[in-house]
Structures are given as C-alpha cells and as structure tokens.
Image (spheres, grey):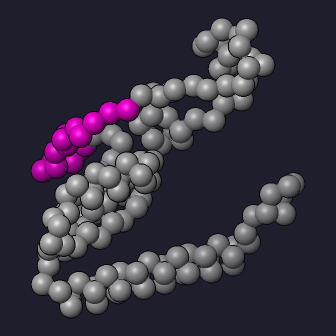
C-alpha cells in the first residue's frame, strides 16, 4: 500500500509481465491456428493506444472485404513501439494519432485519414470563470503527454 493506492511488489510486477506475455502468446497462437485453417490473407495492424477503439474498429471494418478473405490481427501499443515493429516488418500498417517523422524513420510514410476536435465540458458551477483561465484554477482530465493531443494541450 502507498496511501490509498495499492502498488504491486517487485515479484508482483514480474508475475504480471509473465502473465501478460502468456496471454499475448495465447492470442497469437489462436490467430495462427485460425488463420492456417483458411486460405485468407493475414494483415497485421498496429493500433496506437491513444486512439478510440470505436474509431479504429470503424476504420478497419471498412477495409475488410465481405468474403473475409483478409484476416486482421491487431496489436495495441504506443506510437514509438509500433513504429519500431513496423520498421522491423513485424506489422503491415499502423493507425496512430501522430504522423511518422520520415527523417527519423526512413522508408516509412504517413497518410492522414482524418482529424478530430477537442471539446471542454464542465458543470454549471464554473460558468462564471473565463476560458482559458479556468485551466489554471480547476482540475482537468486531459490526454497523456505521450499522445499527440496531450502534447498540444
């Protein structure tokens, strides 16, 4: 315990890492077994963990033909780790919230598929405080700084 939160011990963290790898491998094995039973194309997609799962599923479902001749396998991770896997040819494509810097990742390029806006919502008790001053006075839930949106905020 650390105050009100519970933190895993070193052994707990190690066990979690092993369990995470085991589950990841089991899902990968099931994908391979299911894939090998059909004569379809395996297409591996990396998905940035900052993206909305609803948005990602809509984008990906529009790409799968109705005859299911393409089998999608998705990996969720950070933008940086996905770029690394893509450059190692372990992924066919990634969906991310930020573009590829072609100077740092030669051979990779980006295609902008869309964009979204950010909105601020608050309870009526703060309606007399001006924006953006309110950001200094009140607590705010924002995207993490490792996401493109979080870096902009």
The number of numbered badges drawn on the structure is 0
Horizontally, residue 7 falls left or right of residue 120, namely right
Say which quarter of the image contains residue 124: top right
Residue for point 85% across, 55% down: 4
Any part of residue 89 in sight: no
**Residue in the foreground of this view, choosing between 77 and 84:** 77
Q: In the figure, is residue 44 to the left or right of 6?
A: left
Q: Is residue 119 above or below residue 104?
A: above
Would you say 57 lies left or right of 7 here?
left
Q: Is residue 75 magenta?
A: no
Identified at 71% across, 13% down, the residue is 127
Q: Which secondary structure is most common in the magenta stretch?
A: loop
Can you name the residue that lies furthest to the front here? 66
The quadrant of the image that shows the N terminus is bottom right
User: Where is residue 105 shown, x and y percent of the image?
Assistant: 21, 48
Q: Residue furthest right?
A: 3
- From which residue to which does the magenta span run? 100-116
Q: Residue at x 22, y 73 (%)?
A: 71
Can residue 111 be seen here? yes
Task: Judge whether 32 appears above or below 60 on screen.
Answer: below
Q: Which of the 4 image quadrants contains residue 74? A: bottom left
**Residue at the image position 44 percent from the left and 48 percent from the top:** 52
Whole-percent x and y of residue 58? 32, 52
Front-most of 105 and 5? 5
Image coords of residue 18 (percent x, y): 54, 81
* 13 in relation to 106, above or below: below
In the foreground, 109 or 58: 58
Q: Residue 57 at what x, y percent from top left?
A: 35, 56
């Amino acid at each position: 315990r650390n105050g009100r939160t519970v933190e895993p011990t070193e052994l707990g963290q190690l066990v979690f890492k092993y369990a995470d790898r085991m589950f990841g491998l089991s899902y990968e094995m099931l994908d391979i077994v299911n894939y090998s039973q059909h004569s379809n194309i395996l297409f591996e997609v990396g998905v940035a963990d900052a993206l909305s799962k609803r948005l990602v599923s809509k984008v990906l479902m529009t790409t799968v033909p109705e005859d299911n001749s393409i089998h999608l396998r998705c990996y969720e991770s950070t933008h940086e780790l996905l770029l690394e896997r893509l450059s190692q040819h372990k992924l066919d494509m990634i969906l991310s919230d930020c573009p590829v810097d072609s100077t740092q990742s030669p051979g990779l390029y980006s295609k902008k598929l869309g964009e979204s806006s950010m909105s601020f919502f608050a309870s009526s008790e703060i309606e007399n405080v001006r924006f953006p001053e309110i950001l200094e006075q009140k607590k705010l839930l924002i995207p993490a700084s490792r996401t493109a949106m979080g870096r902009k905020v």
